[in-house]
Image (cartoon, rainbow, N blue to C red):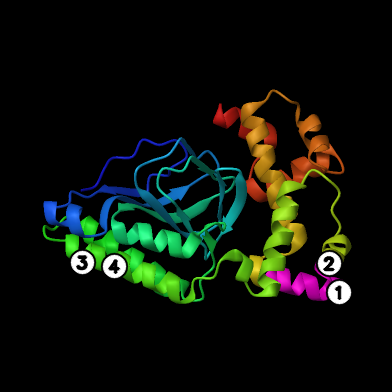
Amino acid sequence: MKINLEERGVLPASQRFMHDNAPFACQHLTHLEFAGNYQCDEGYQINREGIASHLLFVIGSGNLRFEIKNDRFVAHAGAIVWIERNLAHKYYAVEPVCFKWFHFVGSLSDAYCKLLTGNRRPLFYPSNFKAINNHADQILSRLERSETGQDHWIAAELGHIFANLAESGKNEDELPTTNALMLQAAEYIENHCEESISVDYLAEKANFSKYYFIRLFRKVMFCTPYEYLINCRLSKAKRMLLSTDMSVEAIANSLGFSSASHFIKTFRENYGCTPQVFRNIKL
């Protein structure tokens, strides 16, 4: 059953579903409770003390930030995140992101959660992400049709997702070295975007030549390190324009732009308006 959306940061094209399970499914199957296919902007944020169901994310594009217990990490496109039931968690977007999510319970899901996550970070970059994403699409398609008798088929699709994760889902610590290093570099840029960050420094940290590092970064992140840095600064600038009364010049200085005019020019090139116009429109 489709549910109307009234969540901050969730764009109108998004979908959310609730699924009513038969008694047999509730007792014997991995049964789905809620699911969604979300397109969100940087205003999206969820903060919970914990819920009774497991929560699985399939990140299609952009990235989503997570805080689970005392751990913080970023899930990029191609990632799977599994939040164990009853764990306090927070997740939020700092840029446009598209992802699918599923709430489910059942003894089989408990067992797979323990197998896949254990005491490790529940972030995966499986080599068969496409297959997992296809099974996720099948579940959403069945929910959208609102047909009866879907419990067994949905449980089967969830089982396929679990099996694919178990067979080739790599915990982030097992990522191919170059991919892991590029993701670490991207996370470093996000966390230090206000500072003066040189490509030479990032390349040295990753133990690559400057030009090889740029090529690898572009392959993994679909942009250059400089473009990624500017995007992080602009995303943060938008939040500051909406949530503070800081002047445009002060925001430019705090985010490492060489001047207010450089900030305004870059902002206009990316968003089609000046920072002040953006602030006035949003207000």
Which comes sooner in the sequence, label 2 or label 4? 4
Disc number for residue 153 = 3
Picture coordinates of residue 210, whole percent (x, y): 85, 71
Picture coordinates of residue 48, whole percent (x, y): 45, 36
Q: Which residue is mark 2?
A: 203
Residues at marks 2 and 4, CA–CA distance in whole angstroms: 42 Å
Which comes sooner in the sequence, label 2 or label 3? 3
Picture coordinates of residue 153, whole percent (x, y): 20, 66
Picture coordinates of residue 198, whole percent (x, y): 86, 57
Residues at marks 2 and 3, CA–CA distance in whole angstroms: 48 Å
Tell which tag, 1 or 3, sits nearer the viewer: 3
Count every numbered label the image shows and give the total. 4
Residues at marks 2 and 1, CA–CA distance in whole angstroms: 6 Å
Circles 2 and 1: CB distance less than 8 Å?
A: yes
> Up-down: is 24 above or below 261?
below
Q: Which residue is mark 1?
A: 209
Q: Which of the two residues, 207 or 5, is positioned nearer the viewer here?
A: 207
Q: Secondary structure at mark 2?
A: helix
Q: Which of the two residues, 214 or 283, is positioned nearer the viewer here?
A: 214
Q: Secondary structure at mark 3?
A: helix
Amino acid at pointer 4: Glu
> Up-down: is 96 above or below 236?
below
Q: Which of the two residues, 141 or 270, is positioned nearer the viewer here?
A: 141
Main SS, magenta region, reads helix
Which comes sooner in the sequence, label 2 or label 1? 2
Q: Is residue 189 visible?
A: yes
Q: Which residue is mark 4?
A: 157
